[in-house]
Image: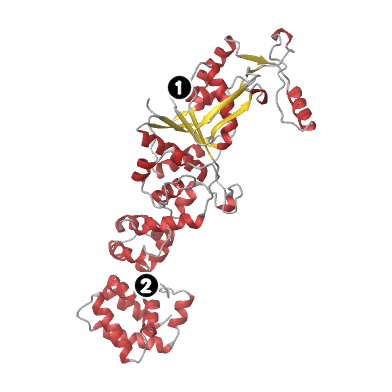
Amino acid sequence: MTVVTRFAPSPTGFLHIGGARTALFNWLYARHQGGQFRLRIEDTDRARSTPEAVAAIIDGLTWLELQWDGEVVHQFDRAPRHNELAQKLLDAEKAYRCYCTPEELAEMREKARAEGRPARYDGRWRERDPSAAPPGIEPAVRFKAPQEGATVIEDLVQGSVRTANEQLDDMVLLRADGTPTYMLSVVVDDHDMGVTHAIRGDDHLTNAFRQTQLFRALGWQPPRYAHIPLLHGPDGAKLSKRHGALALSAYREMGILAEAMRNYLLRLGWSHGDDEIISTEQAIAWFDLEGVGRSPARFDMEKLLSVNAHYLRHSPDARLVELAAPELAARLGRALDAEQTERLERGMAGLKERAKTVLELAENAYFYVADRPLTPDSKGAKLLSDREARANLAELANALERLDDWSESALEDAVRAFAEAKGLKLGGIAQPLRAALTGSTTSPGIFEILLILGRDEALARIGDAVRGP
């Protein structure tokens, strides 16, 4: 048997962190099993489905590098097939036409609410002759659900779960306007796409009972279900925007790497011993549904940033330059030139050790590409406002200008010798020098910066600082 999984989002909003995790689990399981991962856009809700949301889903999966197999299936396009199967159930007397008026359905809901029970259809047209239908009412088509016994699902995460059939009413398959409902469409599409495993959030568990009944009524084998617990915030409450439950695109824009996001999402509800940093290749080799926990995982933004920082530190410098360059260009108001790009590449090794996101990396790297004269921040400006500090920098510049060797070790020896000759601690000259070169009091090592900026640029920046604003 070839394993086939599917990610089936509704395009009524953008792809969020929970949906991204569901897609990842389906993708990993298919790849681990040597099977197929399919993408289906469940766009039967025409009033709420938008092209922008579809595009965001495609873009998010592409960014995460979760490539699907085959063409994208759009559920709305398959409405004729869904109607065909509804008719088959009608012909087999496993479905019936319901002529309830909207007023009757509202009355049922009000009565259930008054009696403190779930609102369910009371089956009044289940055995009734259609000839008794009131005039002018277009019927819905309802499934004739089993009324006795229980429906049991051997869930690959939740274990054996069951519900009494009397708790499930006759769901609508076709609305009065002839359009198929989500429940019918999902069953038909899962069957036609050959889905063997449906991995999804446990908020779909109740749907699984109804869908299992429908599969069996059509003479089909249901897929194996795996309902994974939903994500919670750090406080244990259901994940919401206040916890950081943003659209996936927002994490990309803040500078999270795709591989870091995959690693972090993998560990939200799935474990492999004490392993925290897991490459995608290793995840494919290890992933199984036995490792999925039954308790809700907690989303932790700080943990995501920590994982991202790890991947930044281990990313090739050239790749990080490509990622940071657009941010720097936007701040500069123009593209980086060759000299700025080279400077950035040479400085990246020291920069990436200090950053948690690409945005932070770009912010920290700006001094390497900034136009002269630099505009120091408040702490840097305070250091450079000191007349003695500027006088010392002027003398240091003269000493550095005389150097024949502009290597990191030679620069360090020269600065240390200057501080000693002036009776200063190293910080007494290094901090004003840092402010002159970077506009800040925090940066990579000062001798590394002198080396990467090069003689001409470094001395020019020191000269700017000496002259002051």
Q: Is residue 427 above or below residue 49?
A: below
Position of residue 45 in the picture relative to residue 394 (left or right): right
Instruction: Determine which residue is flagged by label 1.
Output: 192
Among the 4 quarters of the image, the one containing residue 119: top right
Among the 4 quarters of the image, the one containing residue 423: bottom left
Residue 14 lies, in percent from the top left, at 52, 42
Mark 2 residue crowding within 10 angstroms, few (<14) / some (14–19) / many (20+): few
Instruction: Determine which residue is flagged by label 2.
Output: 372
Residue 243 lies, in percent from the top left, at 57, 52
At label 1, which amino acid type do we have? Asp
Q: CA distance from mark 2 to mark 1?
A: 64 Å
Position of residue 426 in the picture relative to residue 235 (left or right): left
Question: Which numbered disc, 2 or 1, marks the residue that appears first in the sequence?
Answer: 1
At label 2, which amino acid type do we have? Arg
Among the 4 quarters of the image, the one containing residue 146: top right
Answer whether residue 16 is visible to the viewer in this image. Answer: no
SS for dot 2: loop
Quarter holding the N terminus is: top left
Furthest toward the left, the residue is 404
